[in-house]
Amino acid sequence: MSKSGSLDSFRLLAAFLVIANHTSPLLSYGEDADFILTRIIARIAVPFFLMVSGYFLYQYIENGDNAYILAFCKKIGLLYALSIVLFLPLNLYAGHYEGTNWGLEFVKDLFVDGTFYHLWYFPGLIAGVSIVVFLIRAIGLKWTSIISVLLYGIGLFGDSYYGVAEQFPSFEVFFQAVFTVADYTRNGVFMVPIFLVMGMLIYKRNKTVSFSINLLFFVISFTFLIGEGLLLHANDIQRHDSMYFMLLPVMYFLFQCLLQIRGKSSKSIRNVSTIMYIIHPWMIVLVRFTAEFFTLEKWFVENSMVLFLTVSSLTFILSWMLMIFWPTRKNSTPSPISRAWAEIDLAALNENVKLLKGILPKNTELMAVVKANAYGHGAVKIAKELSNHGVKSFAVATIAEGIELRKNGVKGEILVLGYTPAQYIGEIKKFKLTQTVIGLSHAKQLNKQGVPIKVQIKIDTGMHRLGTDASHLSDLKEIYNCKHLHVVGVFSHLAVSDSVRSEDIAFTELQIDKFNQTTKWLESQLLLPGQRHIQASYGILNYPHLPYEYARPGIALYGVLSKNDTVRTDVELKPVLSIKARVAVVKTLQRGEQLGYGRAFSATTMMKTAVITIGYSDGIPRNMENGEILIRSQKAPIIGRICMDQLVVDVSAIEGVQAGDIATLIGKDGTEQITAEEVSEKCGSITNELLSRLGSRLDYVYHSN
């Protein structure tokens, strides 16, 4: 059975109910019968559409998938914009915006009531989703449910219970104020949130009561709904008739029943029902106009059932034709969150920049290290974001990394920290990069090319890797004498600045002293050191007082250190990156059955497993087999061997896991969190290696909240 049951099939019935609501098919046979059909029964259509949206949106809200939620709202906004264009001629023909206050009326219609009577659904859905997402993030689903019920209760007294509200002057004054902004309380504030939340609660609860019990309660609540509607109608209490008290239990039990009826997921039916909802008023106009032109009103207009059937048939046929023949742009790339992806929190990145700058001397600027694809965070996007927040200098490891930044519009200084062969000096010049000189021999090779470039000199103060030895002062002077090399800075690297052991502190201070002595000697020789920098991430956190022109934060920019490292500054850096993937399938593993390559895991009892769409080719260490991931805010242990494209977890203790759920390998899910530090420690590695090895197959989703 599809996890959505027969929801898609019912969409089509709901679309026909909307048409019935606007054509009154039983009016020719009796007003009471038509009232029951169009003003009571047909009122389940829009709440159903809203509950479907809430049901499928919740997992993205719960997991903080802002990109998906934004894309959903953009899609609804686009449908609304197309609908406005489609129905604008009808509005103009009807003279709807010809009054003195037509501008205010248009604004109210545009943002609240809808620019045609059925289009309120689109701005209402966008507003409702925005409200619900905000409340869930702020106070959780439980309190959001309570607030949504209260809003719906208020809305009832501006709709079907308005006659009661009129008996109380203060209530009437309140609703009159509401009606200056919206013509109805059937809108995105009062009506939409509760049905979105109901869909979310059903998704989250994911517990199945028997179909017969759900059906029984549906029939009982549906009977009471009809009684409620008729009673309100008989006493002339209604101002409008979209919102009923009993509509809540009716929709809850109806939705549960539909989930339990076998059905097939159908994008075609979803598209057709949406098109039918949008275009059916034009079909009503077309049928009425044609009947009048051929003097057939008696058959096609005065007979309300024929009108309904004709409009429904034309709407259905045209909707199918539009879906089949309308040219659609093929999207050649999948959604960024289709399989496995990295989520990058740009707000956390910028907060880390502020924190690091705050502990450095006032005149010390940051040279952001964005090598190795910005430690797996996306070098181009990270560099541009940092540039927008005042960081104007960047460091990369290779000339190729520097060229990539330039080709993507990154400005400011870009220092290539690693070795570049002299034959590539043309590219250094062309892309305005600053090259590190790693020794006198390298300087001579570069200078021999006769191409003027900017360079910085790496000074070896004890790391004994790249750089000119700090004691070889004559070599330094000779580098300065290379006429085609314009020295704009000197720098070094600290070997044990991440340690607070006394012997390591002494060694670091010795390195700093060597660097200071070297730069002072250069100044004594009238050789300008230019930009001086020696602190990388741990150098900043443990030796923030050093008065150099630049500091080079790398891993600390991204809110990550190593789990057991101790630093001497009190800075709460925020992790910037999360790694997420999807559940592909959930299976049952019987006792004694073995799983995966090498049959490495044997089930000691019957268990439930989930296959996750990420593996070692995406950068997940193969030796992370004793690790955990998060699903539905709970930890699930990895079992068996991690494969190239998948891994398997034990979800026996997690209720309701299903295909499409989001798994978090690094990051937060609800109150639970798995950090990069924890993962790297379990793998016997460090965070730098873990993040910089993230695979190129990962998509990236960036958000700023």
Image: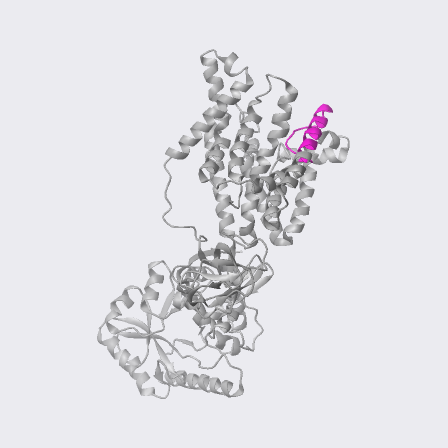
Q: Which residues are magenta?
A: 221-246
Q: Is residue 651 above or below residue 509?
A: above
| Horizontal arrangement in the rendering, residue 564 relative to residue 36 (left or right) | left
* Residue 331 part of the magenta-drawn span: no
| Horizontal arrangement in the rendering, residue 207 relative to residue 556 (left or right) | right
Q: Is residue 673 above or below residue 282?
A: below
| Horizontal arrangement in the rendering, residue 233 relative to residue 26 (left or right) | right
Determine which quarter of the picture holds residue 525: bottom left
| Residue 182 image point, x, y percent | 62, 34
Q: Is residue 216 above or below residue 623?
A: above
Determine which quarter of the picture holds residue 636: bottom right
Q: Residue at x 49, y 36 (%)?
A: 80
Is there any visible trace of residue 553 in the rendered image?
no
| Residue 277 image point, x, y percent | 51, 32
Of residue 141 and residue 406, the one placed in the foreground of this image is 141
Of residue 65 and residue 647, the one placed in the foreground of this image is 647
Q: Residue furthest front?
A: 592
Of residue 524 and residue 222, the one placed in the foreground of this image is 222
